[in-house]
Image (cartoon, rainbow, N blue to C red):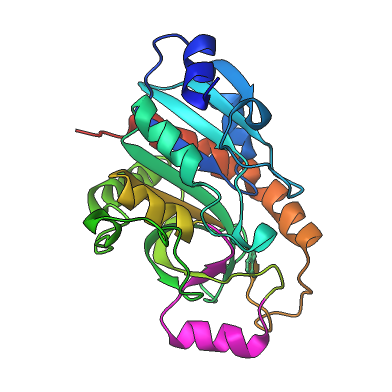
């Protein structure tokens, strides 16, 4: 069976409008899904084999507030295999299912003193530093995707207003994609700040490109887990990222659920 057939068999007639990809620290969102149907990626041909600790590997279908959602708990990163199109088929399936919007989440390092650990940032733009594209090999003129306004200005405005309504602080900024899996050097962090980035992370940019290619609007949020290398005394590690992400997880997931529940997509 194809992924779409499996989904149709497990959740007949379900046509979510919002796709969500959960990164480190954002897994708590799944507790906010009403009437969830869970399907392991292993049962969905084309979905990634989730291999990074701290990530799930399940598709959750259900309702958050007024919206039907398809939530991917776990993503594939470029640093796992070197390929950057690992999310292509999954996003294509979610678009075929009816999704019009991709909400992306990730954990990131901060390049700004006024964006300390536990801060939340809505992406206004990105820097594709590796200059890698998940669209290499596609044919046709659709591959020449316009990336102006890739992070939907209207949905960003709504997210900021919904955060303010909750009394939550949500900042806006530019996300730099570092390929990883090693963390950056202090010199690289200084370079990224000079280039105009506010945060740095190892994900999301390929998915944003894919989403725009597929005609999906994009809203993306970063949970800041640490200051960039050399900007504070702390040593960076995956365990540190995960523990910081866990500490801020409830607040992040709560805000995300509020935003998704109340987005106006019209
Ligand atoms: N660099 C890259 N990716 C990250 C970081 C970082 O400092 N923190 C969380 N993800």
Which residue shows up at 39% across the image and 29% down it?
261
The quadrant where ligand 1 appears is bottom right
Image coordinates of residue 153 in percent, x first then y, are 25, 54
Does the rendering let one see residue 64?
yes
Which residue shows up at 59% across the image and 86% down it?
188
Q: Quadrant of the C terminus?
A: top left
Does residue 265 appear to the left or right of 168 in the view shown?
left
Does residue 114 appear to the left or right of 161 in the view shown?
right
Quadrant position of residue 116: bottom right
Quadrant position of residue 183: bottom right
Q: Is residue 23 above or below residue 250?
A: below
Which residue shows up at 57% across the image and 33% down it?
29
- Is 111 within the magenta? no
Q: Quadrant of the N terminus?
A: top right
Q: Is residue 225 above or below residue 164?
A: below
Image coordinates of residue 68 in percent, x first then y, are 40, 22
- Is 187 within the magenta? yes
Which residue shows up at 42% across the image and 32% down it?
94
Image coordinates of residue 135 in percent, x first then y, are 40, 58
Q: Is residue 182 above or below residue 11?
A: below
Number of marks in the rendered image: 0
Q: Which is more toward the observer, 261 or 130?
A: 130
Image coordinates of residue 26 in percent, x first then y, are 60, 43
Q: Which is more toward the observer, 125 or 257?
A: 125
Q: Is residue 90 above or below residue 4?
A: below
Does the rendering let one see residue 160?
no
Q: Which residues are magenta?
A: 184-203
């Amino acid at each position: 069976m194809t992924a779409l057939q499996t989904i149709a068999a497990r959740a007949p007639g379900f046509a979510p409008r919002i796709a969500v990809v959960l990164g480190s620290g954002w897994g708590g969102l799944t507790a906010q899904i009403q009437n969830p149907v869970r399907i392991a990626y292993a049962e969905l041909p084309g979905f990634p084999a989730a291999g990074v600790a701290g990530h799930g590997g399940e598709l959750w279908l259900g309702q958050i507030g007024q919206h039907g959602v398809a939530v991917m708990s776990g993503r594939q990163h470029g640093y796992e295999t070197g390929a950057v199109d690992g999310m292509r088929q999954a996003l294509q399936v979610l678009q075929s299912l009816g999704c019009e919007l991709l909400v992306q989440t990730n954990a990131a390092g901060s390049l700004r003193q006024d964006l300390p650990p536990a801060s939340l940032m809505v992406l206004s733009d990105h820097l594709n530093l590796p200059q890698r594209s998940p669209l290499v090999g596609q044919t046709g003129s659709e591959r020449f995707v316009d990336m102006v306004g890739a992070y939907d200005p209207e949905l960003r405005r709504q997210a900021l207003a919904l955060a303010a309504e909750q009394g939550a602080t949500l900042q806006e900024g530019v996300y730099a994609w570092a390929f990883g899996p090693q963390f950056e050097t202090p010199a690289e962090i200084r370079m990224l700040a000079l280039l105009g980035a506010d945060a740095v992370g190892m994900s999301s940019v390929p998915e944003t490109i894919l989403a725009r290619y597929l005609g999906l609007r994009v809203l993306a949020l970063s949970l800041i887990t640490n200051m960039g290398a050399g900007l504070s005394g702390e040593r960076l590690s995956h365990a540190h990222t995960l523990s910081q992400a866990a500490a801020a997880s409830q607040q992040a997931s709560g805000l995300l659920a509020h935003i998704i529940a109340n987005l106006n997509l019209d």
